[in-house]
Image (cartoon, helix red, strand yellow):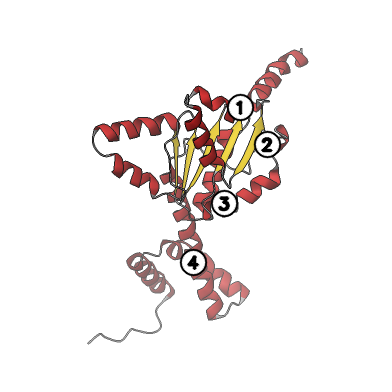
Amino acid sequence: MTPPRQRGLTEQASDTAIDTACRMLRLPSIRNEFSDIADRAVKDQMTYRGFLAELLMAESDDRARRRSERRIKAAGFPRGKSLRTFDFDANPNIDPATIHTLASCEWIKKSQPLCLIGDSGTGKSHMLIALGTEAAMKGYRVRYTLATKLVNELVEAADEKQLNKTIARYGRVDLLCIDELGVLTEREEKNSVATASNESFGGWTKTFTDPRLCAAIVDRLTFNGTIIETGTDSYRLATTRARAAEPAKAG
């Protein structure tokens, strides 16, 4: 028979019991924040229900944050980029309203494609990574890869008779972000594909030399999708020139 719990624990004994229980139940946020929340509950004269709600919300919020961090890490982005840090004023070709609509990720839910097309330095990769990060934060499984890396991986998988397994692994993600588009492996229309390329669609024939193949790939990537042209004015080049001009102005 389980002995009855003792009543009237001291404050120190209570803190120890809470710490032990939180470790056993794997509630790290409650364990870390309990004392502060308890002090705030006394100060604000919270009800027992209000105090319990604060504890549970702290744990839930922290778990959601950690899940987002794991999904972002699993996506394999080469660097962190966010929509918040994108300079829309530097590239008037990109409509902020369109981008923030895309950030809702409804296009991923509908398995629609996205193409980012423009010259080097116009923000394609930043936008690709930022939108992929938004998707990961909203619970979607995301994978980022360079086109050349993807092709090499598929070729090696074919040589090792692992092609179907590799394709299936990529097929399990909700959003596949392909950067520096030169070649493209076909993905079925049940999942989204987002691409970024220096070449306009007309220039893709340099890579896909068969016009009919090129037309088919463009058609697959653009059907029911969003196309954003980031223009030709390089933000990086403009920033470099501005920095170079600063010493001259100072002199």
Density class for disc 4 (Cα within 10 Å; few <14, some 14-19, many ≥20) is few
Determine which residue is flagged by label 4: 35
From the viewer's perspective, is 28 left or right of 231? Answer: left
Foreground label between 4 and 3: 3
As measured in the structure, the alpha-carbon distance from the residue carrying label 4 to the one carrying label 3 is 43 Å
In the rendered view, would you say 74 is above or below 237?
below
Please state the horizontal and vertical placement of residue 204, each as a whole percent of the image: 53, 27
Label 1 close to label 4 by CB (< 8 Å): no
Label 2, secondary structure: give it.
Answer: loop
From the viewer's perspective, is 166 left or right of 41? Answer: left
Determine which residue is flagged by label 1: 121
Which residue is pictured at 47% across the width and 26% down the height? Answer: 210
Label 3, secondary structure: give it.
Answer: helix
For the residue pair 247 and 209, the one nearer the viewer reads as: 209
In the rendered view, would you say 83 is above or below 108?
above
Q: Earlier in the sequence, mark 4 or mark 2?
A: 4
Density class for disc 2 (Cα within 10 Å; few <14, some 14-19, many ≥20) is few
As measured in the structure, the alpha-carbon distance from the residue carrying label 1 to the one carrying label 4 is 49 Å
Density class for disc 3 (Cα within 10 Å; few <14, some 14-19, many ≥20) is some
The amino acid type of the residue labelled 3 equals Trp
Which residue is pictured at 39% across the width and 34% down the height? Answer: 150
As measured in the structure, the alpha-carbon distance from the residue carrying label 4 to the one carrying label 2 is 41 Å
Please state the horizontal and vertical placement of residue 96, each as a whole percent of the image: 69, 44
The amino acid type of the residue labelled 4 equals Ser
Task: Count every numbered label the image shows and give the total.
Answer: 4
Determine which residue is flagged by label 3: 107
As measured in the structure, the alpha-carbon distance from the residue carrying label 3 to the one carrying label 2 is 23 Å
From the viewer's perspective, is 159 left or right of 117? Answer: left
The amino acid type of the residue labelled 2 equals Asp
The amino acid type of the residue labelled 1 equals Gly
Residue 63 in view (yes/no): yes
